[in-house]
Amino acid sequence: MASRKPTTRALLLGLIPFVAMCFSVPLWDRIEPRVFGLPFNLFWLIGWIVLTPVLMSVAYRIEAAADKRDSAP
């Protein structure tokens, strides 16, 4: 089976958590305010750890639909 390039939408969905956790550090690198009793920086990271599989599943569905569309006669 030949490989193909991923769709742009799936790539962007995959990059969102990476950018949110790695390149936004100056925005959330603080302890106050506290959210649910957690320092804000810990809440931010845990939030993105929870959201990442959701975004990856949406990207997977986009890729699966593109595969189905490309293989249809």
Image (tube, rainbow, N blue to C red):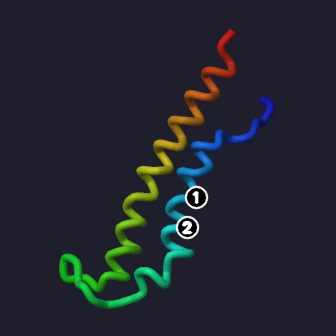
The image shows residue 61, relative to residue 31, as above or below, that is above
Q: Residue at x 54, y 41 (%)?
A: 60
The image shows residue 48, relative to residue 23, as above or below, that is above
Q: Amino acid at mark 1?
A: Leu
| Residue 6, position as x, y percentages in the image | 68, 41
Q: Which residue is mark 1?
A: 15
Q: Residue furthest front?
A: 27
Quarter of the figure with the C terminus:
top right
Query: Could you say whether the residue bearing mark 2 is in a helix, strand or loop?
Result: helix
Q: Amino acid at mark 2?
A: Val
Q: Residue at x 58, y 43 (%)?
A: 9
Q: Residue at x 54, y 35 (%)?
A: 62
Q: Are marks 1 and 2 in contact (CB under 8 Å)?
A: yes
Q: Residue at x 37, y 82 (%)?
A: 41
Q: Is residue 34 left or right of residue 28?
A: left
- Image mark for residue 19: 2
